[in-house]
Amino acid sequence: MQFQIFNTHDEDYLEWWKIFNKLDDKFKDIHFIPEYSKIYEETYKYQAFLAYYGDEDNFIIQPFIRRPLNELDFLKKNNI
């Protein structure tokens, strides 16, 4: 088992697509493709990633965005 994080650029982008294409059709969702994350990056200027854990046949993936927590509205209100 391995854990890796991919971004939306260069070789990582290609690997992200390879991982997505391994998913069974019933699990494929637009939110898991790198283009969806790239749109978020271009719109909000935060970097997107894909977390991957598993092996060649059995794995889990989770796209996520890295952004400053102190910019979240509910934390701004509390001065955290």
Image: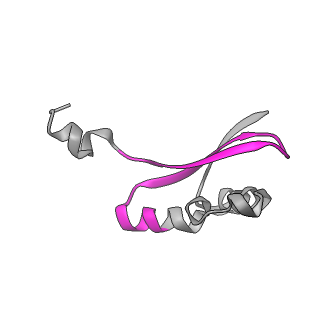
Residue 21 vertical placement versus 5 (above, below) = below
Residue 76 percent across, percent down from the top left: 18, 40
State whether residue 80 is above or below residue 6.
above
51 sits to left or right of 55: left
Q: Is residue 4 above or below residue 65?
A: above
Q: How is the image coloured?
A: one colour
Q: Residue at x 57, y 68 (%)?
A: 35
**In-image side of 52 versus 35 (left or right):** right
The span shown in magenta is 39-67
The total number of labels drawn is 0
User: Residue 73 appears at what percent x and percent y?
Assistant: 22, 46
Give the residue displayed 60% in from the left and 61% down from the top: 9
Location of residue 24 by image quarter: bottom right
Picture coordinates of residue 59, whole percent (x, y): 75, 43
Is 36 inside the magenta-drawn segment? no
What is the quadrant of the C terminus in the image? top left
Q: Position of residue 38 (x, y in %)?
A: 51, 65
Which residue shows up at 75% across the image and 57% down it?
23
Query: Residue at left 51%, top 61%?
Result: 37
Q: Where the N terminus falls, by quadrant?
A: top right
Picture quadrant where residue 68 is located: top left
Decide whether residue 64 is among the magenta residues.
Answer: yes
